[in-house]
Image (cartoon, grey):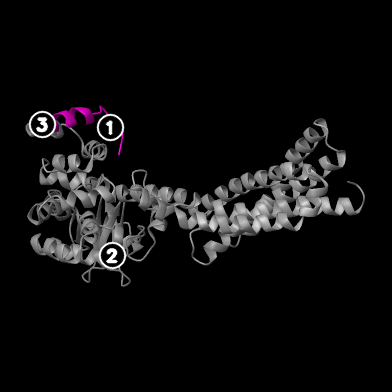
Amino acid sequence: MVVEVKHDHTEEVKNYLEANREEDIARLLEELHSSDIGRLLMSLEDEEAMRVFKLLSPEQASAVLLEVDERLRKALISSITSEELIEVVHEMETDDAADVISELPVEDAKQVLEGIDRHEAIAVQKLLVYPEDTAGGKMQAELVSVHETATIEETIEEVRKKAEEIENISNVFVVDRDGRLVGSVSLDKLILARPKTRIIEITNREALHVTTDMDQEEVAKLFQKYDLISMPVVDHEGRLVGRITIDDVVDVLEEEIFEDFYKMAGLHTEARALDPPLRAIRMRVPWLFLNLATALVAASVVKLFEGAIAQLVLLAVLMPIVAGMGGNAATQTITVVVRALALGEINFKNARGVLLKEVLVGFCNGFLTGGTAGFIAYLLGANPIVGLLLFLAMIANMMIAGLIGTIMPLVLKRFNFDPAISSSIFVTASTDVGGFFTFLGLATIFMKMGLL
């Protein structure tokens, strides 16, 4: 897999490997950031990547495993012993450790959990029960919390103590005697308060929090909307169980963007450029068969009007224009609507206004592009009635594109399906059928009226 690395060291590392100069590779790796090492490993063959990975310290390896894709991560983990894997997992934060352990076979996962620190193992096991795409699946157990009766002085001391094992502390969470979240205090506010003041006096009781079962996409929207750095996670009884940090949310946003991108292209979300041919075929062919089925539906519409096409062959030349323009317009509409749904800008209450707007936009775009296409057809020698036919069919199909491009993602959302799956196949099929039917249907009517 060829991946560009900043200050690309791929060839240099390959040469070192051929010469068995592991010490030189180890020195080079010490100078690189974990993300650069991850990209370096993905630029090597699997066997080469495994050799390089074994040269990393447990601390480096724990960070690098999070920077490579799932396929390579499994290969790298399989290349080290259980004892080495335990050391690597021990260096991870609980949420990352849970992600790695969840991918292991049951016996290997059990062995790793038994090998790491007991308290860490308990925290990881608690995280493993939550679905990966929820707040509980994304949270980490490491956080700083104090009882509501603590003083500022005691709280700062707690922060100092926890800072040795927790990165990126931005908030202290305040709980009652039952462990229920009372609120949070930002570090800057904590530092400026007087030492003997009770923490509860400066606590923000209205601080945002999420429950363990909230979808990761909804969590990301809250971070985006309120410019958050971290957020507490509570169970259904309000007890503080973890926190989500901005770096976790960035991963979620990237994951959601690529997931939607793949689905809109009719691809399985696990498909990768360097997949073996058989895996790539297995990932893609189901969608292609579905596309074939919808294409046959469109072809059957054309067959209904084969008599009209036989009388005027020019219809066969022009009808792809109507269908193609409708497909492009529908893709524009659905992209806008899917994004708006993802950001929470539209819902079922205000969807009617969006629907009317998109149909109006379709009418106007159809009027402009249809008029242009009809005029060009006339200049090229077509009958003026054919130009009119093309004009009317373009308007109709553009309006269909606006209608279907808005309704379909809303319907899928209503039934808890991802709206992104609705574009490339279903919407294109709708505009193909709509375009062919309106264009050829109008042509048939015009012929019966003696206009063609």
Quadrant into which the N terminus falls: top left
* Residue that badge 1 annotates: 5
Amino acid on which the number 3 mark rests in the picture: Arg
User: Could you give the CA–CA distance between mark 3 and mark 1, rounded to whole angstroms?
Assistant: 17 Å
Q: Residue at x 68, y 47 (%)?
A: 323
- Does residue 342 appear left or right of residue 157 in this picture? right
Tag 1 or tag 3, which sits nearer the N-term? 1
> Does the magenta run of residues contain 362?
no
Residue range of the region highlighted in magenta in the rendering: 1-20
Amino acid on which the number 2 mark rests in the picture: Leu
> Does the magenta run of residues contain 15?
yes
Q: Quadrant of residue 300?
A: bottom right
Q: What percent of the width, then of the height, locates residue 325?
A: 67, 43
Tag 2 or tag 3, which sits nearer the N-term? 3
Of 41 and 199, nearer the camera is 41
Of 387 and 300, nearer the camera is 300
**Crowdedness of circle 1 by 10 Å Cα count: few (<14), some, many (20+)?**
some
Amino acid on which the number 1 mark rests in the picture: Val
Query: Which of the labelled discs sits on residue 350, or is there none?
Result: none
Q: What percent of the width, then of the height, locates residue 199?
A: 23, 57
* Residue that badge 2 annotates: 181
User: Could you give the CA–CA distance between mark 1 and mark 2, rounded to whole angstroms?
Assistant: 44 Å
**Residue 6 to residue 315: above or below:** above
* Residue that badge 3 annotates: 27
Q: What percent of the width, then of the height, locates residue 334?
A: 58, 51
Is there any visible trace of residue 347 in the rendered image? no
CB within 8 Å, label 3 to label 2 = no
